Amino acid sequence: MNVNTFRIARPDGEEVGLCFDPLLSMANHSCVPNACIQFEGRRASVRALRRIEQGEEVTISYIGG
């Protein structure tokens, strides 16, 4: 099974682990995403970067930034 993982980093940028979540991994990539994955401790959430219209696909960037 090929799925995405997400790097977990502290606020200073130090990487501390990987997150494997099958539901989050279903998000598609966009170079101009409308959402991002954020970590608060061990909890991951999807946060909108702008208003997402009804029926619009939720996309994230696979490239760290």
Image (spheres, rainbow, N blue to C red):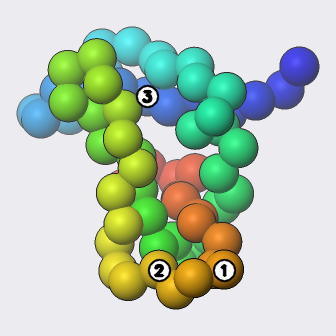
Q: CA distance from mark 1 to mark 3?
A: 28 Å
Residue 29 visible within the image: yes
Tell me: residue 9, above or below residue 25. Answer: above
Q: Amino acid at mark 2?
A: Ile
Q: Which mark is residue 52?
A: 2
Q: Secondary structure at mark 1?
A: loop
Q: CA distance from mark 2 to mark 1?
A: 8 Å
Residue 14 visible within the image: no
Name the quadrant containing residue 44.
top left
> Could you say where residue 23 lies in the image, as x and y percent from the top left?
63, 34
11 horizontally vs 5: left or right: left
Q: Amino acid at mark 1?
A: Gly
Question: Going by the picture, which residue comes out furthest to the left?
Answer: 12
1 vs 3, front mark: 1
Q: Which residue is mark 1?
A: 55
2 vs 3, front mark: 2
Residue in view at x 66 percent, y 72 percent = 57
Tell me: residue 54, above or below residue 46. Answer: below
Residue in view at x 65 percent, y 51 percent = 27
Quick one: label 2 or label 3, which is nearer the N terminus? 3
